[in-house]
Image (spheres, rainbow, N blue to C red):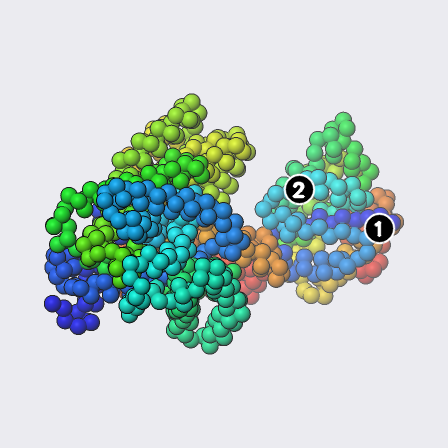
């Protein structure tokens, strides 16, 4: 059916490009686009990809490894250590309860206890790839929900090792299984007794930490010295491949190892270099992974017994959701965060493929059971983004609004003239200064835990997603004079601005922008008051540097003001230019050249010499020429 | 020995040939405090308590500035507005500056000749400085005639050095034994006998 590597590559790439752009056009997560592309090019629709889908799946799992490495890079060892209780607590409750319920469910359905147990194990594990990709895409990593989800997934990464180790004990046949598979069978660790297994795990972790400190960082320094850019890319891959190999050799999860490697390197000076190098590869591999999942959905099996499969699928998702809800309850998450967690981790994850295949090789599962379970796994993963959308658009608005109105109704009713959206470092500074002038803004923030904390500190902060009109309305947008948007995520900022601009044109928008490019977008939306967080502070720093070098402070003050004026003018001019390909790059370069010329002129003339303020030399020259004439 | 505070205000000091020479000459003199207002308060946000403490600690206050539009640069006016508070510098309880000495040191582009009723500036320097004189008087300070470096547009280097040296001498005199009587009959401190002798 398929013709060579090139053809396959074309199929995958074209499928991804078409489906993901369509999904994005409809405001859906890119994960849905990839899954859809997978289904389309898979054996049951267009048939471009056949049985090799499984192999691609294994290959693409590497995207998950890279993702965890990158996540690790963002978590400093100290913070990771602080998370240990959450990881253990949330993870134990989630995995334990899910396994218990699933086991009971499948036993009642008439499965043998060993089969039920294997399925219970597989079901307990969620999909790191899907959940984390969605969380990152929505910028929710810093919320309570984000870190809770991450903790659970990390715990699953650890527990899967023991599950794989336990499987042979359940085996019906004493013969050693066929081990030419990609899964973690026949590895070092499973040949050891349980106590030594734990020891091996600890040793591997220590090895990664030591290697990070004393091998990888010195190596990166050497590589960086060569200033050959592609060497650094090679080094980044070497690190991830190396850790994965070591982990697979020992029999641990490569994703877990990569995560640890990331944490170890998060303090190093190469953190951002590694991030920017691996990010695009990771995204492509993850895309491939999602497509492979889509392609592996076996529609023949579904057609054979659609009702059974549908029933089990719904039962499993509900069961997982219930357990997650209980877990969140135990850890006292706010209702909205609880719901997000419930629906984002309710799928059966990619580890199930490994566990189930291994159990099949060990003759614990028969052909029919594994087929059904694999289909359910793939379907549940594909359904996750859709469930997420339902939660986001239908359930959360009701729940979230209810909660935020129920509590602060009397306060919001006061409807201050100013609404401040986002109360992180930026927004809180704005809010504090306003409050010091007796101006109490109505503050909205997305993280309910932060809202609670800030309320204890005496701030009037309300929980809510500002991209929802109903929440803005209950915060009094109709009577508001000014809306300040101090959100970190540029996408959300754009959404909020667009919404308010369309529905409440009388409200003056004052918007925080991350950089020039966000400023362009906002300017093109017709927003005038844009505050680039990268402008004032950096100039203040530069000013202080020059002052230390002997320049006069007052002159520098004027220089900075002039610079800001130039820059604001140029950004307004550039925003009007169409941003397409070479033309844009060319314009941007021209603009930079122009700015350079202006600045150069400033220095030759002395920026304030343009108007010759306070310069007696200028008058002297003019007088002398007059005398000569 | 009296302690001297030089309040200096020039928005473009780095470009002022005359003031660079003057300040260069007096900066190192013992017992004086050179206070560069535009460098200290580039945002015009004057720290009033600090300034008042500084004033209290000195006996002679010099307002040193270019004579822009017959007055001082805006930051010096800001300083006067902010620092000389009611009931501190003036008013029934305002005695913090009583019997201190005060004077202007100015640089002008135009020469002495243009500052008279027949010249194109119509008034004398002393007349233009009346607001400063009265400010000093209201605060109970003894106000001296100004020390002026005039015609800076056409000042050659030797003449400028001479002015700078005279400024230095004046500071030394102010530290010890200059009295109001010495300046009697002089429109400028430049003309007092002690400096005239040196100059000629």
Q: Could you tell me residue B7's position as x and y percent?
A: 71, 48
* Dot 1: chain letter: B
Between circles 2 and 1, the one closer to the viewer is 2
Q: Few, some or many C-alpha atoms within 10 Å of disc 2 (few <14, some 14-19, many ≥20)?
A: few
Disc 2 on helix, strand or loop? loop
A11 shown above or below B72: below
Quadrant in the picture for residue A367: bottom left
Q: Which mark is residue B47?
A: 2
Left/right placement of residue A137 relative to residue B91 reads left
Distance of mark 2 from mark 1, alpha carbons?
27 Å
Left/right placement of residue A25 relative to residue B55 reads left
Is residue B50 visible in the rendered structure shown here?
yes
Decide which of A423, B21 is in the foreground and name it: A423
Decide which of A467, A353 is in the foreground and name it: A353
Pick whichever of labels 2 and 1 is earlier in the sequence. 2
Is residue A538 visible in the rendered structure shown here?
no
- Looking at the image, which residue is at 54% across and 64% down? A625
Q: Could you tell me residue A453's position as x and y percent?
A: 50, 36
Q: Could you tell me residue B97's position as x and y percent?
A: 78, 37
A295 shown above or below A484: below
């Amino acid at each position: 059916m398929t013709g060579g590597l090139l053809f396959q590559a074309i199929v995958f790439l074209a499928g991804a490009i078409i489906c993901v752009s369509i999904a994005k056009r409809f405001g859906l997560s890119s994960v849905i686009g990839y899954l859809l592309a997978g289904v389309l090019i898979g054996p049951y629709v267009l048939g471009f990809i056949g049985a090799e889908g499984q192999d691609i799946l294994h290959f693409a799992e590497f995207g998950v490894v890279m993702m965890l490495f990158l996540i690790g890079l963002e978590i400093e060892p100290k913070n990771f250590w602080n998370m240990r209780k959450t990881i253990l607590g949330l993870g134990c409750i989630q995995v334990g309860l899910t396994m218990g319920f699933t086991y009971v469910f499948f036993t009642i359905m008439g499965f043998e206890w060993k089969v039920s147990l294997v399925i219970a194990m597989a079901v307990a594990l969620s999909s790191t790839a899907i959940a984390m990709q969605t969380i990152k895409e929505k910028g929710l990593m810093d919320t309570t929900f984000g870190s809770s989800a991450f903790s659970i997934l990390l715990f699953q990464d650890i527990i899967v090792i023991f599950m794989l180790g336990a499987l042979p004990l359940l085996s019906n046949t004493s013969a050693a299984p066929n081990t030419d598979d990609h899964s973690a069978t026949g590895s070092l660790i499973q040949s050891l007794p349980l106590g030594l297994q734990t020891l091996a795990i600890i040793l591997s972790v220590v090895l990664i930490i030591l290697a990070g400190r004393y091998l990888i960082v010195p190596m990166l320094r050497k590589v960086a010295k060569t200033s050959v850019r592609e060497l650094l890319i090679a080094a980044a891959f070497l690190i991830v491949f190396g850790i994965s190999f070591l982990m697979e050799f020992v029999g641990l999860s490569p994703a877990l190892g990569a995560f640890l490697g990331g944490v170890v390197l998060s303090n190093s000076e190469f953190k951002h270099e590694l991030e920017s190098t691996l990010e695009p590869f990771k995204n492509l591999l993850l895309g491939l992974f999602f497509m492979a999942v889509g392609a592996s959905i076996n529609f023949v099996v579904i057609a054979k017994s659609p009702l059974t499969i549908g029933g089990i699928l719904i039962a499993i998702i509900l069961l997982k959701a219930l357990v997650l809800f209980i877990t969140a309850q135990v850890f006292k998450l706010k209702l909205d965060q609880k719901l997000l967690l419930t629906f984002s981790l309710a799928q059966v994850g990619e580890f199930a493929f490994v566990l189930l295949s291994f159990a099949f090789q060990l003759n614990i599962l028969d052909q029919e059971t594994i087929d059904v379970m694999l289909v359910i796994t793939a379907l549940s993963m594909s359904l996750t983004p859709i469930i997420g959308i339902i939660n986001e658009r239908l359930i959360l608005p009701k729940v979230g609004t209810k909660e935020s109105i129920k509590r602060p109704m009397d306060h919001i009713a006061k409807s201050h003239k100013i609404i401040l959206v986002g109360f992180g470092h930026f927004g809180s500074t704005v809010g504090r200064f306003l409050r010091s002038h007796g101006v109490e803004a109505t503050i909205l923030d997305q993280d309910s835990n932060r809202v609670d904390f800030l309320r204890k500190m005496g701030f009037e902060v309300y929980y809510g997603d500002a991209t929802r009109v109903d929440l803005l309305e209950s915060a009094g947008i109709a009577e508001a004079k000014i809306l300040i948007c101090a959100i970190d995520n540029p996408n959300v900022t754009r959404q909020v601005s667009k919404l308010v601009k369309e529905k409440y044109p009388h409200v003056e928008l004052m918007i925080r922008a991350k950089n020039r490019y966000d400023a362009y977008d906002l300017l093109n939306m017709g927003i005038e008051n844009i505050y680039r967080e990268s402008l004032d502070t950096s100039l203040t720093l530069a000013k202080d540097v020059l002052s230390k070098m002997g320049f006069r402070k007052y002159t520098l003050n004027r220089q900075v003001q002039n610079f800001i004026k130039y820059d604001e003018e140029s950004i307004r001019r550039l925003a009007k230019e169409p941003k397409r390909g070479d033309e844009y790059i060319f314009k941007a370069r021209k603009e930079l050249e122009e700015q350079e010329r202006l600045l150069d002129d400033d220095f030759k003339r002395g920026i304030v010499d343009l108007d010759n303020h306070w310069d007696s030399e200028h008058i002297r020259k003019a007088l002398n020429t007059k005398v000569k004439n | 020995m009296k302690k001297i505070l030089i309040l200096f205000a020039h928005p473009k000091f780095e470009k002022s040939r005359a003031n660079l020479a003057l300040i260069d000459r007096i900066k190192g003199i013992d017992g004086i405090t050179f206070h560069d207002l535009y460098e200290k308060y580039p945002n015009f946000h004057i720290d009033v308590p600090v300034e008042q403490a500084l004033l209290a600690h000195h006996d002679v206050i010099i307002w040193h500035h270019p004579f822009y539009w017959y007055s001082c640069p805006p930051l010096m006016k800001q300083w006067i507005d902010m620092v000389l508070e009611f009931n501190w510098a003036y008013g029934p309880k305002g005695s913090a500056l009583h019997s201190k000495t005060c004077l202007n040191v100015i640089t002008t582009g135009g020469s002495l000749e243009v500052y008279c009723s027949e010249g194109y500036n119509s008034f004398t320097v002393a007349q233009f400085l009346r607001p400063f004189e009265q400010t000093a008087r209201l605060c109970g300070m003894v106000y001296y005639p100004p020390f002026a470096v005039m015609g800076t547009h056409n000042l050659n280097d030797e003449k400028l050095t001479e002015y700078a040296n005279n400024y230095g001498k004046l500071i030394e005199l102010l530290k010890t034994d200059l009295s109001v009587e010495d300046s009697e009959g002089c429109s400028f401190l430049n003309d007092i006998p002690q400096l005239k002798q040196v100059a000629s």
